[in-house]
Amino acid sequence: MKFFVACAKGLEYLLADELVALGATRATAALAGANAEGDAEAAYRAVMHSRLASRVLWPLAEFDCANENDLYQGVHAIDWPAHLDPEGTLAVDAHVSGPALTHERYAAQRAKDAVVDRMRAAHGVRPSVDTESPDLRLSLVVRKGRAIVSIDLGGGPLHRRGWRQSQGDAPLKENLAAAMLLRGHWPKLYAEGGALLDPMCGSGTLLIEGALMAADVAPGLHRLQGALPTRWRGFDEDLWQRIEAEARERAVAGRAALRPAFFGADLDPAALHAAVANADRAGLAELIRFDRAAIASLKAPGPARGLVVCNPPYDARLAADAALYRELGDALRRAVPDWRAVLLCGSDELAQATGLRAAKRYAFFNGALECALMVCDPLQPPARAPREAKPLSDGAQMVANRLRKNLKRFKSWREREGVFAWRAYDADLPEYSAAVDVYEEADGERRSFVHVQEYEAPSTIPEADSRRRFGELLDAVREVFAVPPAQVSIKTRARGKGGSKYGRMDRRDEFIAVQEGRAKLLVNLFDYLDTGLFLDHRPVRLRIGRESAGKRVLNLFAYTGAASVHAAVGGAASTTSVDLSGTYLEWAGRNLALNGAAGRAHQLVQADAMAWLLADRGEYDLIFCDPPTFSNSARAEDFDTQRDHVRLLRACVARLAPGGLLLFSNNFRKFRLDEAAVAEFATCTEISAKTIDPDFERNPRIHRCWELRRA
């Protein structure tokens, strides 16, 4: 039988593993849950034992559902007398998407009406609604024209363990606490004699969940207090009682063996009072030590090794600032440098503020808020002994010589023009085919980073040769630039059908600011194939900055908004940045804010640029249009620069104010401008040579660029 187990976003893969451990024959991660296969026992065990699940949904029926009539008829067709007592109680939780059914409460009401009408027709009486503790809780999901009606086997949210009645201002759900503990490998660490420490414990959720996990106490025991999770007529009570009896035996044995290895601290006396009360209800009052203490006075609780778990404040209700996170990081490094730590931070910026180096990062969702979960192991990594430098091979020496030559060649130009992000090498030696870019940090430690992109070798080159040559290139880079390994980003750019393969490559979420002219721009050198800043367009962006004073500037296919930032710092009256990617627009917003250009004058528009342009009626003095070679996003009409450029340019010119300028660029090497067609509505002059700086002169067709004005 297939069934669905829901959880918070970010826990799906952990949940799938847990379900298999609980007896499911198969479990695969889905959005906000896992699709599981197994018998009723596997589902019942999930209700009793799962620490990560929010709900366990056992399907009753699935049917086409294009409108509310289909919904009513589909639910009405189910044999409800076989599932519910005529005078019982029920509740319906609905989740709907699509154009036909948009109101979840209305969909739940129609489903409830269908159940009630079917029961009244069969027995002359009807069940009543009880949203708090119904005999039967139903789940209705309508998506893409299909409806699924399921029994909620747990009878409600499983994260409510039953022992937490007192809580602080921003409580952490118990299943999120369990996920943090599992990411920190807490059960294994406890078995090895480790301790658990929460230096900002609030109402004690993480410590209590950790103690119950160590004691093998099933989450369902305290939540249900011996009651059945559902009074569904199809529920196998004998099977449930066997599972419950086994869970009680395990809990008794686990509690008896549990040792006092749990330590919490907080400055808020009300939070500590709630923590003590919650621990008492969970039967753990003698095993968890709570102290009123500031982060600055944190001390190791005793064991040589353990796990720090912490959910520092970060939402609008609580005061969260980088200084607090820095203080937390400093205290942990000082007090428990050899321990492992799992910290749930409200944002990437706050995670970085701790100053801790994360071995792994995960995206967690606390409700609708996306948080950064960082795992540090250990908190203070031991200093590495310096390795003896090996002499470079002949090939590596050849690359090193070329790099030094380029450094010398570009030095006066970089110093004269103030260039801090530039290309140092671009397959200068054909057999060493890679691009090497240098980014110098604008603020803080002013570190230098090296970004190395390997180009995919032709299929005729043996793989062993390609690996050897790339290794030699990296040896040369490390010797010439002499930066720490953590400041060298290494990527392979493989060519796929139609273009580059884009995607997330890492999850460091580390941004640095680089200076370009008067603008500061954020780059991410590790997580994506591209860094957020196309270096070859530097001259165009600087020109936009020089010519934007008092003008209305439109940036199409805006990417991370670098051109908009240059316009803003150049005194533009307004900027409008259009891109289909929400990730890039968020990045653009951060770039604008970094330069003091946030506000209504600087709009960010998430849209298909072509469709938006055709619908827009605004007027702009300067337009920058740098489209991708192609786009086949599911959220927009397919776009091909060669095929569609005339239509795109015509729409851009239509939005130009009298005397306005359109700068059009693209990096499709085979691009051919349809001059005759463009001449019908614009004058056009190619300016490509003027938009190539010395660091890209070896690759003059990196892009092409034109000026267009109304004919």
Image (cartoon, rainbow, N blue to C red):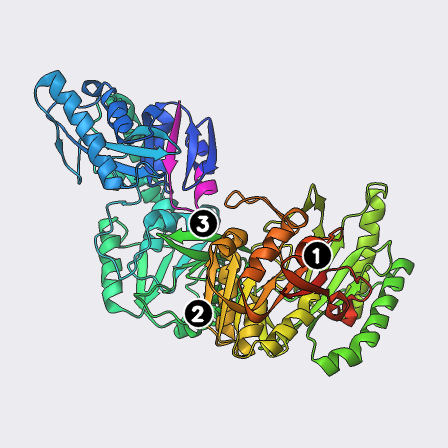
Q: What secondary structure is found at the residue carrying circle 1?
A: loop
Q: What secondary structure is found at the residue carrying circle 2?
A: helix
| Amino acid type for the residue under numbered disc 2 | Tyr
Q: Say which of 627 and 390 sits in front.
A: 627
Instruction: List the single residue furthest toward the bottom.
Output: 416
What's drawn in magenta, residue-wise?
A: 1-15
Q: Quick one: label 3 or label 1, which is nearer the N terminus?
A: 3
Q: Say which of 327 and 650 sits in front.
A: 650
Horizontal relation, residue 119 to residue 525: left or right: left
Residue at the location (74% across, 81% down)?
415
Say if residue 1 shows up in the picture.
yes
Q: Nearer the viewer, mark 2 or mark 3?
A: 2
Please tell me how crowded label 3 is: few (under 14), some (14-19), or many (20+) other residues with Cα within 10 Å: many
Q: Say which of 242 and 35 sits in front.
A: 35
Q: Say which of 107 and 389 sits in front.
A: 107
Q: Position of residue 615 (x, y in %)?
A: 47, 54
Q: Position of residue 397 (x, y in %)?
A: 88, 63
Q: Quadrant of the N terminus?
A: top left
Q: CA distance from mark 2 to mark 3?
A: 23 Å
Horizontal relation, residue 485 to residue 269: left or right: right
Q: Nearer the viewer, mark 2 or mark 1?
A: 1
Q: Is residue 525 above or below residue 164?
A: below
Q: Quick one: label 2 or label 1, which is nearer the N terminus?
A: 2
| Amino acid type for the residue under numbered disc 1 | Asn
Q: In the rendered image, which residue does mark 2 sit on? A: 325
Q: Position of residue 623 (x, y in %)?
A: 58, 66
Q: In the rendered image, which residue does mark 1 sit on? A: 667
In reply to whether residue 326 is colored magenta, the answer given is: no
Q: Is residue 87 above or below residue 569?
A: above
Q: In the rendered image, which residue does mark 3 sit on? A: 186
Q: CA distance from mark 2 to mark 1?
A: 43 Å
